[in-house]
Image: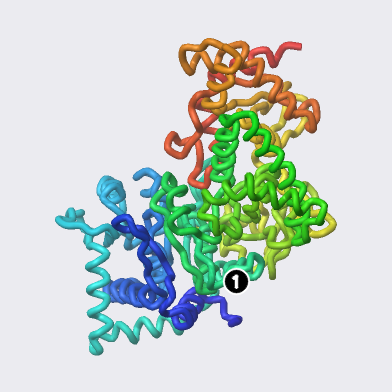
């Protein structure tokens, strides 16, 4: 392995070694079609040549506003090969949010996917003084005219780039080669804007070394190799999906792109991936769907499922540590696998070796459940500022409820107040245009202050207990970490989302978005007559049932941490309605503002003794 931490070197080495192998796959006209490593390299060079010809200088910023598709990594590597800095933007963001990022970064060129994204740029382009060029990835005719901005199609870019490289008198190939030779691992490769649960987003400056060292450590820890195919659906704007893509490219694996988040089930069947990456909310939805289907089964099938699940959890104690299942348990596990688990795995394409979870804490119960059915989820931990992986569980070394051991070349320590500090080649340069914000999180000794609270056990496994800034301080001075309670509540099949409340209050309360389908079923099974969803959520018997369910799940928490009151909300908290970040974290300030009247009701008697 090379000691040079350059993304471009990693890519060119793989393109040479795996030239005829599928690098990328995309579904077109109902069929998945592949792009080989050699074809990807040619397109990368064509786009890079075009950018150089049109004045891209070293460290100029180029934005990438697109859903996952082969053109994303092609444009990304082309920007970096040409010496530029990629500014990825979530395609779900509004024009106003995009405007801030384009102007803060001083973006000169933007690649965008389709007409809907082009419309956003058209609406704000008068306020983008540095933006000079727009490239649209979708085939397009009659491209619009934007004042002082040239709009071209991706096909035009490829064609012009190809001609420039073929023209020996243009000097473009020599210039591209020069830029590749003079690239340094300390050069900035990307500015990734944090999704910002509060306040304006910050541009995280990440270098070749940040990304490349993290990708190589991921390969070593998780065992990626050239035989694997990954289904990619977590946005490539998310630094976890992006670094996993770099890791897969580094070892010559194949990346297939899901059509959308809604087609994952179908695409799993078509691609039959051996791995994929997701955030916990995706696994929660899969788990809830499985449990709902089981609850709708006849009593015998339901009994067999839960028997098998119990056997699977016993076996997971051994399989999670890479140990053989004892013979006394093995035959039961084999039977349970045939009757129960094989059917669950078949829905993932029946080839899944493992999945990676990151972006937020994964509930211990979820990890145990998926290990039990033979889908091994390796939870990791990190932040955008750490490129992102700091720790991860790995094959043969999983501790449920922990985010694993520190990856190679990275250090972790716990500050006196419980905050997790990290240091290593994956730590960002700082926040773009924000030196004061950088000094707040990066100390003189190179330690990055994560803002997360955690603890290390004797074996070096890290457990995350909460976000430092999200700690709820009650009126009695007690500190409550909301995430462990929220995660516990969500293990009930009747609860899909839970948001803890209690700042400056005498007791804890919660907003609960329940599983409406299961509550409907419960009402029918218990002859509870309701004429609407509103009646369902306010019916005394339904409320009493969920009250008992919540109290049952609070048994292991301190008395002051337990939910005393709750209110049911019909509205799911999503990105579309603005309550979740693109990484599916709660925007607590906005949630508190939107539901302020309901929250006021919950604490109406908080001041009374």
Q: Where's the N terminus, which quadrant? A: bottom right
Given the current orientation, which residue lies at the most extreme bottom position?
A: 168
Instruction: Name which residue lies at 22% across and 68% down.
Output: 156
Report the side of 79 relative to 544 (left or right).
Answer: left
Q: Residue 137 appears at what percent x and percent y? A: 29, 60
Q: Secondary structure at mark 1?
A: helix
Figure check: 326 above or below 367:
below
Q: Residue 551 appears at what percent x and percent y? A: 73, 24
Q: Residue 83 appears at what percent x and percent y? A: 41, 74
Report the side of 134 relative to 233 (left or right).
Answer: left
Instruction: Name which residue lies at 44% across and 61% down.
Output: 256
Q: Where's the C terminus, which quadrant? A: top right
Q: Name the residue nearer the viewer: 278 or 106.
A: 278
Read off the residue under disc 1.
Answer: 216
Q: Residue 122 appears at what percent x and percent y? A: 25, 49
Quarter of the figure with residue 4: bottom right
Res. 59 in view: no
Q: Name the residue nearer the viewer: 416 or 599.
A: 599
Q: Which color mode does the image show?
A: rainbow
Instruction: Name which residue lies at 56% across and 71% down.
Output: 212
Figure check: 147 above or below 211:
above
Around disc 1, counting alpha carbons within 10 Å, would you say few (fewer than 14), some (14 to 19), or many (20 or more)? many
């Amino acid at each position: 392995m090379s000691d040079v931490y350059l993304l471009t070197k990693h890519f060119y080495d793989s393109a040479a070694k795996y030239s005829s192998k599928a690098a990328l796959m995309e579904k077109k006209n109902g069929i998945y079609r592949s792009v080989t490593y050699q074809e990807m390299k040619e397109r990368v060079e064509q786009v890079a040549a075009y950018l150089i010809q049109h004045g891209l200088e070293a460290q100029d910023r180029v934005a990438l506003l697109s859903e996952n598709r082969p053109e994303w990594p092609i444009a990304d590597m082309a920007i970096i090969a040409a010496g530029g800095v990629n500014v990825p933007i979530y395609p779900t963001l509004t024009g106003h949010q995009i405007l801030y990022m384009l102007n803060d970064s001083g973006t000169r060129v933007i690649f965008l996917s389709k007409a809907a994204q082009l419309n956003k740029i058209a609406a704000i382009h008068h306020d983008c003084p540095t933006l000079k060029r727009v490239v649209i990835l979708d085939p397009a005719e009659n491209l619009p005219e934007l004042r002082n901005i040239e709009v071209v199609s991706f096909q035009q870019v490829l064609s012009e780039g190809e001609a420039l490289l073929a023209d020996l008198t243009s000097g473009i190939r020599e210039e591209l080669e020069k830029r590749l030779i003079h690239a340094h691992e300390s050069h900035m490769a990307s500015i990734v804007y944090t999704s910002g649960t509060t306040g304006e987003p910050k541009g995280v400056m990440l270098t070749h070394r940040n990304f490349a060292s993290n990708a190589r450590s991921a390969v070593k820890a998780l065992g990626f190799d050239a035989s694997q195919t990954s289904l990619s659906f977590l946005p490539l704007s998310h630094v976890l999906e992006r670094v996993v893509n770099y890791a897969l490219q580094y070892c010559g694996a194949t990346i297939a792109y899901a059509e959308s988040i809604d087609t994952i089930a179908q695409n799993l069947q078509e691609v039959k991936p051996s791995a994929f990456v997701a955030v916990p909310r995706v696994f929660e939805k899969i788990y809830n769907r499985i449990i709902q289907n089981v609850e709708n089964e006849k009593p015998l099938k339901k009994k067999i499922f839960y028997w098998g699940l119990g056997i699977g959890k016993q076996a997971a104690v051994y399989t999670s540590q890479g140990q053989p299942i004892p013979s006394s348990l093995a035959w039961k596990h084999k039977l349970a696998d045939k009757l129960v688990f094989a059917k669950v795995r078949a829905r993932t394409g029946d080839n899944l070796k493992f999945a990676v979870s990151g972006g937020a804490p994964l509930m211990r119960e979820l990890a145990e459940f998926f290990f039990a059915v033979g889908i091994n989820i390796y939870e990791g931990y990190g932040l955008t500022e750490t490129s992102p992986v700091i720790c991860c569980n790995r094959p043969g070394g999983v501790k449920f409820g922990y985010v694993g051991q520190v990856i190679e070349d990275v250090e972790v320590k716990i500050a006196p107040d419980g905050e997790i500090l990290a240091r290593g080649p994956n730590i960002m340069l700082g926040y773009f245009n924000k030196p004061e914000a950088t000094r707040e999180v990066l100390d003189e000794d190179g330690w990055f202050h994560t803002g997360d609270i955690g603890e290390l056990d004797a074996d070096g496994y890290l457990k995350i207990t909460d976000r430092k800034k999200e700690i709820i301080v009650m009126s009695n001075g007690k500190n409550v970490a909301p995430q462990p309670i929220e995660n516990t509540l969500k293990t009930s099949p009747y609860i899909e989302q839970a948001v803890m409340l209690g700042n400056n209050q005498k007791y804890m309360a919660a907003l609960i978005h329940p599983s409406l389908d299961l509550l409907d079923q419960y009402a029918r099974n218990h002859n509870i007559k309701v004429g609407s969803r509103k009646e369902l959520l306010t019916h005394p018997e339904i409320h009493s049932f969920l009250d008992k369910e919540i109290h049952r799940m609070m048994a292991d928490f301190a008395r002051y941490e337990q939910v005393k009151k709750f209110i049911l909300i019909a509205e799911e908290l999503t990105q579309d309605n603005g309550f979740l970040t693109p990484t599916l974290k709660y925007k607590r300030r906005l949630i508190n503002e939107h539901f302020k009247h309901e929250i006021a009701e919950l604490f109406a008697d908080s001041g009374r003794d």
